[in-house]
Amino acid sequence: MKKLYEKNELSFSLVWIIAYVVLFSMADSFSGDLGIEKIITAPVSVCFSLVLFVWISRNSLLEKYGLCPFKGEWKCYLYFIPLLLIMTTNLWNGVAVNCSAAEVVLHILSMLCVGFIEEVIFRGLLFKAICKSSVKQAILISSITFGIGHIVNLLNGADVLPTLLQICYATAIGFLFTIIFYKGKSLLPCIVTHSVVNSLSIFSVQSSQTFRIAVAAALCVVSARYAIWILKKAENHIS
């Protein structure tokens, strides 16, 4: 892996993204066949996360890819209060538990890992690779690919409208997370927010189409406005 990384960081990041999409799609499919959601995905998530983290750590790349303390001034980021709002998205329509305790644990474990993995490969590896030639392109591509990446949910049986809405607000949130990383040099706020949003989805209540559209619109507006605030207020720490 190190040879590929040293030769071409962009290709390296794409390999990780492809491996992630393929492995997790297969894991979710096998879990469904076994009748226990995430029974295969959970251990795959943990192994994938460990391999990714260990490789980054052993090659002394933790700071480069944002696995380090936040370096910005918290007040310029509104003390991350908007992130707390985003975290609660899946609870806006109420709370319910419609599966076994084991499935809840497996889901939360999987989603915690997914939050870490997606932030590192999209906001870390991909963003930093493209950043070498153009920061603007890096922000744009990192955000869009993260959003479009959710189209894979269609292959796992998700409905079309919810998936399209997810692509829209995931792109907006991806843009926000990229800006946070770009300004503060740390992925930790993004990883925490992403992991919490994913984990709480197991407790969400089925909502109407109108409600889903309203939530997607709210997330897009909040993410865009917050990102613009950061761009205007936060000091640019990128050298």
Image (spheres, grey):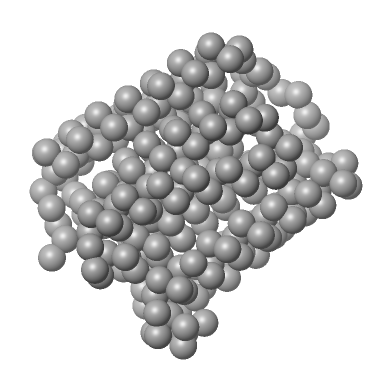
**Residue at x 16% of width, y 60% of height:** 238
Asked if 204 appears above or below 52 in the picture, the reply is above
100 displayed left or right of 131:
right
Count numbered badges in the picture: 0
> Looking at the image, which is closer to me, 29 or 159?
159
Q: Position of residue 8 (x, y in %)?
A: 40, 79
Q: Position of residue 46 (x, y in %)?
A: 64, 59
229 displayed left or right of 163:
left
**Residue at x 87% of width, y 46% of height:** 33
Asked if 130 appears above or below 192 in the picture, the reply is below
Residue placed furthest toward the bottom? 3
**Residue at x 87% of width, y 41% of height:** 35
Q: Position of residue 75 (x, y in %)?
A: 16, 36
Q: Quadrant of residue 123?
A: bottom left
Asked if 78 appears above or below 217 in the picture, the reply is below
Q: Position of residue 164 (x, y in %)?
A: 54, 32
Instruction: Examine the rendering and report whether any part of residue 39 can be seen.
Output: no
76 displayed left or right of 132:
left
219 displayed left or right of 44:
left
**Residue at x 33% of width, y 43% of height:** 175
Residue placed furthest toward the right? 34
> Looking at the image, which is closer to me, 148 or 101?
148
The C terminus sits in image quarter: bottom left
Instruction: Examine the rendering and report whether any part of residue 2 can be seen.
Output: yes
